[in-house]
Amino acid sequence: MDIASVIRHRLDEQGIGQRELAVAAEVTESYISQLLAKKKTPPAPDRTDIYDKIAKFLKVPSKELARLADTQRREELKRKVLDPPRPLFQEFRQLILRKCVATKKKQITNIFEREPFGEFERFITQKLLDVAKRVAKEELEDEKWIHRVARVGKQSYEETRVLILEFLDTDVFHVSVENCISFLDPLIESWDIEFENFGMEIVLNRRLTRKHLKKLEFREAEPEPAFETEPGLEVFLGDAKLRADITELEIAFLKSLRFDGKRPSPLYYYRELQNLRDPLNFVPSSIKKRREPGTKTSVMKRGVRRKTAKRRSRRPT
């Protein structure tokens, strides 16, 4: 059974219409209709909140809806994976080039035209989509933000939520005209790229984002060396009495300790944990550093006090 069948069955059981479900899910009735008619692919569970809202309204487990949606998406992906990549539609490419900084627009246009939807064009497009998706996902629960986006796009709150949910579920091969006009265009102010290291700087609309400047850097880095967990730490972590409500951060700290060939005992880790938790072992950041008695400033102050005392002693009585 697929997700559309489950939802339709629950609607029939409870005598509820698609309009009521749309209101509960904060989307348009048209969106629900297309979802139930299987004209629209169910959104990815990790990119949307719609399954939680539908499950709460229909009184069904949200995890079950998410599982069905994930299964259906995998089946559709198998069918799509054999399709060759399609070039960007003209409006999307024009939007990307229009947002490019003026100093590099001609050069990037030549690259795009020489290699239509080649690696460089896909790279730029994907990074712009990634940044826009992060913004949308971070702000999805903020009704005020969605209302601001709706006003910019001159649409209703529900229509805007649908567009955002669909945008979160799209990829570089399936971006729609609606995604460009209603979300990408008002969100992205400009972008720039350094050809030497492919670092990007993306400027976003201040009215629609908290952080309007995004920088993406790509650097070669050596992999971090892997360290085996010390036997004494394994024993310590396996003893419920010794570990006593240890947190993930504390475990990470104990794992980061290095001993140059020495093998610490479980008791050592217990004492290290107690030292880490003891506030007396740490100086509060609010306490100012006191000057030592032998510092230059303290010596100068003592000299001034002595000279003042001598002058006072010489005054006639």
Image (tube, helix red, strand yellow):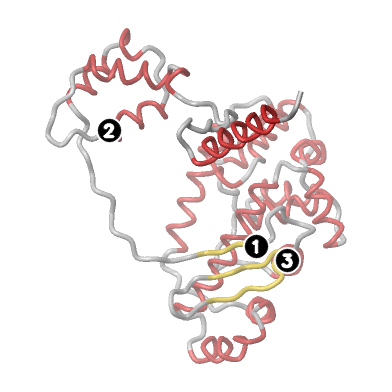
**Disc 3 target residue:** 178
* Type of the residue with mark 2: Leu
Q: Is residue 70 above or below residue 273?
A: below
Identified at 22% across, 17% down, the residue is 266
Q: What kind of element bears circle 3?
A: helix
What numbered label is drawn on residue 257? 2
What numbered label is drawn on residue 292? none
Answer with mark 1 or mark 2, whichever residue precedes in sequence: 1
Which tag is nearer the camera, tag 1 or tag 2? 2
Answer with mark 2 or mark 3, whichever residue precedes in sequence: 3
Say left or right for 267 vs 214.
left
Identified at 31% across, 20% down, the residue is 272
Say left or right for 29 vs 192.
right
Q: What kind of element bears circle 1?
A: strand
* Position in image of residue 291 (x %, y %): 52, 33
Identified at 78% across, 50% down, the residue is 146
Q: Nearer the viewer, residue 242 or 263?
A: 263
